[in-house]
Image: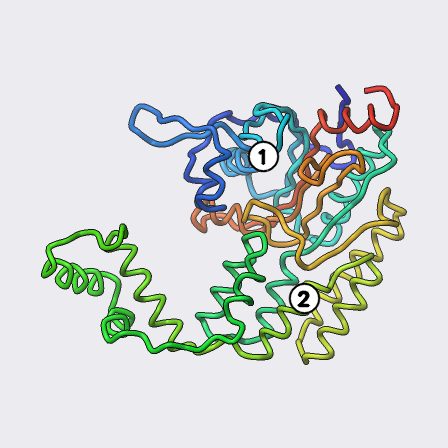
Amino acid sequence: MTSFQFEAIGGDWIDPPLLIPAALPLELSGESIRSRLITSSDTPGEELALRPDLTLPVANHYLAEAGGEPVSYRYFGRAFRQARTEGEPVEFNQTGFENFGHTDRLERDVATLTTICSEIAGAGIRNAQLNLGDVSIFHAVVDALALSDHWDARIRRANKRREGVEAVLASAEGQTVKASSALAQTLAKLPADDARDLLDEVMSISGTEVVGGRTKEEILERLQARAEAANAGAMPDKARAVLGALKGVSGTPDVFLEKLRALASEYALNLSSVLEYTEKLFSALSERDMPFWANAHVSVQFGRRFDYYDGLVFELYHAGLTREKPLALGGRYDGLVSWLSKGAKDVPAVGGVVRPDRVDAALNLEGGAA
């Protein structure tokens, strides 16, 4: 098995606990991830999961062990996920690193990406494709649109799902806004407890706890959402145009930047901050002559399955393997530590991970020694 050391990053080698609360990945990525988790219950009844990757348990280790100084950890260990493609193992090795508390975002993003790409190239891989994006660019575009709370929240939620934004745009096309019911409007204006009490009273009159297979909590959520949607009105034409155009903001690094600048100019969007950062990042990666950078593909639509990523995201594929089997991946997750600690500690974080088994498979395809 090919070995990776990540000496450019440094830090202690650790092996965090195999079991984590199942609530962590479920709350971060929703019930859609449940089918891939391997779960059980401990004695008090808490649902546990074998770690689906090592980022979450390493972040928990950081919270338990680290002080206030910037720190990096390296790791090699087993992860456990139900396979999405035929022939994939449920149990596999991951190796990688995570950085916490490094405040120079540009330096650490560059170090993370160049270390991963250099390690993969150093293992002998030649025919790989680097795909990357930046989740913060999408959020900067949504910020610049200055949408109502309803549309702002709906679009951000949709971006966490594959093809989610496209689905929202399709549903908004030619949309006519229907007035919500008097009950929906009344419930939407009440505090949560009062709204629940009122719905309880209404449902008790009918003598049922479930309507159409939905519980009263689900009914309350739907009625409130209906009222919010009616009050918000249809999605603004400008928002539909911008979000539709975003899908085309992709290409090589130079082409991507050109398209992003053109989008900002055409629709008068204030994207100066993300444009400046992206220009600096791409320039730094070019100056380092990073492996696989010449043919890199950048897209605003590119993202990761786990919802904790909020900045740079990347995956490195091999031409002989499917895109569902990346050799390496990673990204920035500045909000994760704060979320895990319930706001007690807020530090920037970024990391990368390699699948040695896939690197070995790619080497075999290239005729190298695994």
Q: Give the residue displayed 67% in from the left and 49% down from the top.
A: 313
Q: Position of residue 130 (x, y in %)?
A: 78, 45
Identity, as a three-letter code, of the amino acid under mark 2: Leu
Query: Gap between marks 1 and 2, in whole Å?
Result: 28 Å
Q: Is residue 198 above or below residue 238?
A: above
Q: Position of residue 370 (x, y in %)?
A: 81, 20
Q: Position of residue 35 (x, y in %)?
A: 47, 36
Q: Secondary structure at mark 1?
A: loop
The local crowd at label 1, few if under 14, some if 14 to 19, many if 20 or more residues have their Cα within 10 Å, is few
Quarter holding the N terminus is: top right
In the foreground, 350 or 218: 218
Q: Position of residue 61 (x, y in %)?
A: 53, 33
Q: Is residue 281 above or below residue 84?
A: below
Identity, as a three-letter code, of the amino acid under mark 1: Arg
Mark 1 or mark 2, which is nearer to you? 1
Q: Give the residue displayed 75% in from the left and 27% down from the top.
A: 5
Q: Which mark is residue 84?
A: 1
Is residue 262 shown left or right of residue 13?
Answer: right
Quadrant in the picture for residue 315: top right
Is residue 248 shown left or right of residue 333?
Answer: right
Quadrant in the picture for residue 341: top left
Q: Secondary structure at mark 2?
A: helix
Q: Earlier in the sequence, mark 1 or mark 2?
A: 1
Pointer 2: what residue?
A: 246
Q: Are marks 1 and 2 in contact (CB under 8 Å)?
A: no
The local crowd at label 2, few if under 14, some if 14 to 19, many if 20 or more residues have their Cα within 10 Å, is some
Q: Give the residue displayed 36% in from the left and 66% down from the top.
A: 225
